[in-house]
Every structure is written in structure tokens, then in C-alpha cells.
Amino acid sequence: MVHCAGCERPILDRFLLNVLDRAWHIKCVQCCECKCNLTEKCFSREGKLYCKNDFFRKFGTKCAGCAQGISPSDLVRKARSKVFHLNCFTCMVCNKQLSTGEELYIIDENKFVCKEDYLSSTSLKEGSLNSVGSIGNNT
């Protein structure tokens, strides 16, 4: 008798799936994080199955701003070889999202200030300014 790798119960169904060289009930082939059914493709690590988004969020590149995973479908910005979600790439003073080509100031490696706020703030000028530059993007 064949047992399911997901639920460990016998497979009595007419059809079964072979995933990672193990037999599964069709309903048991699901992402271990979000529980969505994995009908076309799946990713695995340490015997666990993941959908594409959860796999890359858990094991892929992490955002330097929030430390959360970045999915291949997420839009990102890069600054000094670090990758950020668009929502994390904002001015720390006014919270404005910074755009491609916009001049910015980098403070403490992962914090950004737009040019307008930097020029209007003397406390930032006296702080730990690391770099001035313009940003690029990556999608």
C-alpha cells in the first residue's frame, strides 16, 4: 500500500502525484506556508513544498529596509548593491517614495533622505552622511 508523503495516510485514490520522488494525494500537494494548491509547479527545501512567492520570500534575497523576502514579481530599487522593496525605498523625513534618477542622501547605510529634506535640515548635515548619489531601479 502506498502512503502519502503529505498526510501519511494510504492513497486509495485512482490517481496520485509523484513529487520529489514521493507519492502524494492530489489535495496534499500544497504550499506549507499559505496552503495554496500547487497544480503546475512547486519549490522545495528540506522536504517541504512551497509556492513560488513563499519560497522566494523565505529563502530568496531580503530587502535591506525591512528584512523581508523579495519575490521575483516584486518591484525593487537598488542602492549601493543593496535591494529594497519600492515601499521601503522612501525618504526617512517626509516618507516620499524615491524615484529612479532622483538625487538622494544615504544615512546609516539603509536610510534615505530626499534632496529637499536634506538641504532644509541642518541636523542631518551634521549627522552621519555616507554618500550622495542618484538611484537606479530594477524590476
Image (cartoon, rainbow, N blue to C red):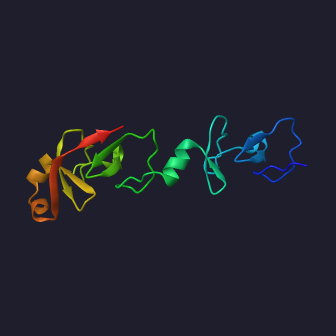
Residue 73 percent across, percent down from the top left: 45, 38
Residue at 78% over, 52% down: 7
71 displayed left or right of 112: right
Residue at 74% over, 45% down: 28
Image height of 81 relative to 13, above or below: below
Q: Quadrant of residue 86?
A: top left
Image height of 47 relative to 53, above or below: below
96 displayed left or right of 12: left
Of residues 49 and 33, the one drawn nearer to the viewer in this rendering: 49
Q: Which image quarter holds the C terminus? A: top left
The single residue placed furthest to the bottom in the displayed view is 127
Q: Quadrant of residue 51?
A: top right
Residue 101 percent across, percent down from the top left: 19, 39
11 displayed left or right of 46: right
85 displayed left or right of 130: right
Residue at 29% over, 52% down: 81
Residue at 25% over, 41% down: 136
Q: How many marks?
A: 0
The single residue placed furthest to the front in the displayed view is 21
Q: Quadrant of residue 138?
A: top left
Residue 97 percent across, percent down from the top left: 27, 43
